[in-house]
Image (cartoon, coloured by chain):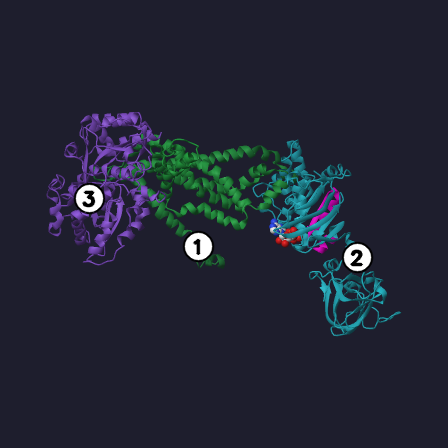
Amino acid sequence: MTSDRRVPRAARRAVPPGLLATPALAWLALFFVAPVGLVFWYSLGRKPGLYQTHANDVLTLDRYREALGDTFLTSFSGTLRIGVTGTALCLAIGLPFAYWLAVKVRPHRRFVVLALVLVPFWTNFLIRTIGWQVVLSPEGFASRAMQSLGLIDAPFSMLFTRGAVLLGVVYNYLPMMILPLYVALDRIDGSLREASNDLGANRWRTALQVTLPLARPGIAAGLLLVFIPLMGDYVTAAVLGGARGNMVGQLVASQFQQAQNWALGSAMAVVLIVVIALTILATAAAGAVCTWLLTHRRRRELAGIAEGSAA
Amino acid sequence: MNHHDHTPRLLAPAARVAGLPRRTFLAGLAAAAGAPLLAACGGSSGSGGSGAAAQLRAYSWSAYDDPKVLAEFTAKHGPKVIVDSYSSNEEMIAKLAAAKGTSGYDIVIPTGVFVPQMAANGLLQELDHGKLPNLANLDKAFQNQEWDEGNKYTVTKYWGTTGFVYDTGVVKRDLKTWDDFFDAAQKEASGKTSLVDDPGEICAMLCFARGWHQSTTDKAQLDQIETFLVDTLAPHIAAFDSSPGSSAIPQGTHVLMHCWNGDARRGILASSEQDRWKWVLPGPKTNLWMDNWAIVKGSANADAAHELINYVLDPAVAIKQVDFVGYGSGVTGSEEEARKLKLGLIDMIFPSAEQVATMYTGVINEGQERRMAIVNKMKAKAGA
Amino acid sequence: MSSSPTRNAVASGRRADAGDGKGSVELRSVSKSFGGVTVVKDLDLSVNPGEFLSLLGPSGCGKTTTLRMLAGFEQPDSGEVLISGAAVQHLPPHKRDVNTVFQSYALFPHMTVAANIAYGLRQRRGIDRAEIRSRVAEALDMVQMTRFADRKPNRLSGGQQQRVALARALVNRPGVLLLDEPLAALDRKLREDMQVELKLLQSRLGTTFVFVTHDQEEALSMSDRVAVMLDGRIEQIADPYTVYERPATAFVAGFIGQQNFFDGTVADAGRAIEIDGGTVLPAEPVTIHGSGAAAVRVAVRPEAVTVAEAAPAGPDGSANALPGAVAAVSLLGDVLQYVVHADAGHELLARVPRRQAGRLAEGARVWCSWAPSDVHVFPAEVTPRAPIGSAK
Ligand SMILES: Nc1ncnc2c1ncn2[C@@H]1O[C@H](COP(=O)(O)OP(=O)(O)O)[C@@H](O)[C@H]1O
Ligand SMILES: [Mg+2]
């Protein structure tokens, strides 16, 4: 190989392609492919007895049949509802906020605001969620404050409602949405917005036609960073939603921790991974189709100008 | 150091915070959050004493020991006690079995019915009664249990039972039985009822009410349990909470709460209106369980582990533990001692003899998986 | 498709509205400060429809700020802004009859060249799709970028992006086009070509151009009038010839082209200047207010200086003549540039056509001389910030 004279010297000295990616690939193999592979392998097995967790002596798809029962589907649809609503809420709150931060706040203050956004992350995830439980309970701060202000006359409880779940979800995941959005919006040159304004577009049209399309990678990153962990998180929902916060992740965890049925737990985990991936793909596809439909007419109206000149 | 420091609910007013619960699915997570605190209090007092082992690692239900007791043990005998917590016996067994003697834990606290299985699988080390002179303090009633004849592997640490607590401001009638519980849950307490997050306990409720064995494997009975829980009870349940005592009772979150006696006592003691809550040991039957000290097979610090077990069998130490968790210990005379010290809500720790007569222990059997599936289905229904 | 009819169409679209004040710009005592620092001070400026006006000045003098107040990106603290006769200081950019060519071009990276150009038209009501298409095609043709219609901006060179930015602004047929150093990012050769092209385009379209630059050659070669700015004020506004030949202030004199400066005092009833070393420089009669011996600063262009080995003859041989030695010679294309150390201590810069005289060697003894009419006299109290090109 090295004796091949036709290979330019620089090319021979250069790092072989792929070498730079090796650590990343090794990481991926070790911490993603291997565990998922193992889970998949377990999912084809069974729970042989009361005191054993799994066995692969017989390979079967029966666990998938069990996994896809009523319980799983009901839990999953509830989880999907919380996942989608929570992600949408994070986007609805995070987008204007990130825009304000990237565009309106003076550069030297942005750091301070970003630090404030991240303050909740300095505390343990569970502690800050349970903190909300304290705030939202009938004897809690929110209820007392509203009573002393005369807004309500009996203790109220927001705890263990869907609203509490969404509140906790937004609280815990909003920074994951804001950060990528902020980075994406901050990277958009301010003169592009000025150019749009100068060309006759008001603020809203500028946002829709220039800022949002350019922030798309950030929006996608934010959606994924919130949606994926949220679909697997059952703590936030259980702490604040109680029975109303039943998440499919809890079902999977209970198979591993309580039922000690790793085969069924693995099958549920695999189904969950597949369904989450399909949801993301479907959303991405729907987004692409919408964009295409929205811009299609405009592209047609300008198509062929270049060819016209060649003729 | 106060036991307040062990709760993850740092935002709560200190006066209203009790210890962590025995069983909660959050326990593992809470342990992660609280581990530095536990480690810190374990090591708070010097390292004097015999000092064979620098530290003891216990794998236990969370907040199951008075940190003051552990600190005093360290001061007297040397080893620091580091506690990790689990939230189910299954979780603990899985961890020990997977480690095959290399878990690094010296002490575990299995519930009685799990002991034979653990012993048979070589997870536990036989106790050296010569190193446990205080074993003489253990009440006869708690020795020689059917799951550990001759106390070969275990010494009873706590015993407890299951019942419920209700808000007398909302439920204005006397609830006495499991059927009363079901009735209130569907009426006054609908949407304000919580159940312990434990499949065995949840399924056992109907068994106690109907007079079936609480660990039934009878298919027809299990089907009835499923229908009742999923179709009748689930829509009225607000939460699956193994420790209403740690926040739901002090904060008045629910009206009707299925719970263990120690947890209920802790919650009522922490409440600003103790009279508002009523604890019921429901008839006709209810549960009895024992959690036990055991030494892990392969422990490198077996001597120190014996030392700790022996230490807490001292009646003066045992009573501090009892006051901290609210469960009875097996040490002779601890009830009399507790009455002498006038511990709060003492009847919740020590039920009367007639009440104890209505309690019995469950078993581990092949109905487990079905009970798990029933409860998961119930949760899905309650969340829908 | 031939190009000239479409270019005319763009041009006529613009000219049709001319004459009703469309395209005029007026700033009336406009001031603007940032954080307590006044950047534009009480500025008055009036631009006629169809005029090519340059704002010229050193970096930081407030040119961009002035332009941004015209575009609507900045609000003046006080004063009035009129565009095409209407007061617009309270209107947002999208409601003003101006378009801007940004220094960074600011092309939308997610749109093709054609879509970039169509952007402004699409924001308006009442322009149908066929018209958008034909106007985009015209605009592309006007800047000779038709071939690149379907490309994304990041696949164009700097010069091509510049043309697209121009087309994107002009396709809207604004009354006034604002350009902020549009050529600064181009290399020299391309910049010079674009200067010519831009000027031709402007005169063909008749659109008012307000053109910001810090490059005096660029300003002089392209503009109908040049406004020279310093510290947020206009020092002089005039046609390029006047700015060059009759600078109003010592700063303008120094900023435009190069100068030999002398500091001195007025003597001989205003007909001569005494500079340090006792040399007397006769000048055209000066009107300097104040006492008889007012301090002044005198400027003489290098190209007005004659360099000769012999002392100049004439009625007054020593008038405007300094003896010295050649310190350096350099060839600047058609011109020879001498640096002469005068015996009186001054350093003089002289530029003579290459063919006019034989080349003098370094160290040669010479006389530098110039006509009284080439002497510009300014009050001395104006101390310009190190004007570029002043010979010291
Ligand atoms: N948005 C702003 N905030 C603060 N200072 C500014 C701002 N814009 C311009 N300046 C300051 O105003 C002065 C003039 O700037 P500018 O108009 O850009 O000058 P020019 O375009 O002539 O180089 C500079 O000192 C600049 O730092
Ligand atoms: Mg500028």
CB at disc 2 and ligand 1 closer than 8 Å: no
Helix, strand, or loop for circle 2? loop
**Do residues under tags 2 and 1 come within 8 Å of each other at their CB atoms?**
no
Q: Colour of chain A?
A: green
The magenta-colored residue range is C195-220
Residue to which mark 2 is pinned: C246
Instruction: Examine the rendering and report whether any part of residue B123 can be seen.
Output: no
**Quadrant placement of the C terminus of chain B:** top left
Helix, strand, or loop for circle 3? helix
Q: Quarter-wise, where is residue B142 in the image? A: top left
Q: Which chain did the renderer colour cyan?
A: C
Indicate the amino acid at tag 1: Pro
Q: Are marks 2 and 3 on the same chain?
A: no
Residue to which mark 3 is pinned: B341
Indicate the amino acid at tag 2: Arg
* Type of secondary structure dominating the magenta stretch: helix
Tell which tag, 2 or 3, sits nearer the viewer: 3
Where residue C191 appears, as percent x and y from the top left, is: 68, 52
Was residue C219 drawn as part of the magenta stretch in this picture? yes
Mark 3, residues whose alpha carbon is within 10 Å: few (<14), some, or many (≥20)? few
User: Which one is nearer the viewer's eye here, C108 or C385?
Assistant: C385
Side of C100 where C19 appears, left or right: right
User: How far apart are labels 2 and 1 at the CA level?
Assistant: 68 Å
Where residue B144 appears, as percent x and y from the top left, is: 11, 41
Side of C175 where A36 appears, left or right: left
Instruction: Examine the rendering and report whether any part of residue A63 can be seen.
Output: yes
Mark 1, residues whose alpha carbon is within 10 Å: few (<14), some, or many (≥20)? few
Q: Colour of chain B?
A: purple
Indicate the amino acid at tag 3: Leu
Where residue B297 appears, as percent x and y from the top left, is: 18, 49
Chain where mark 3 sits: B
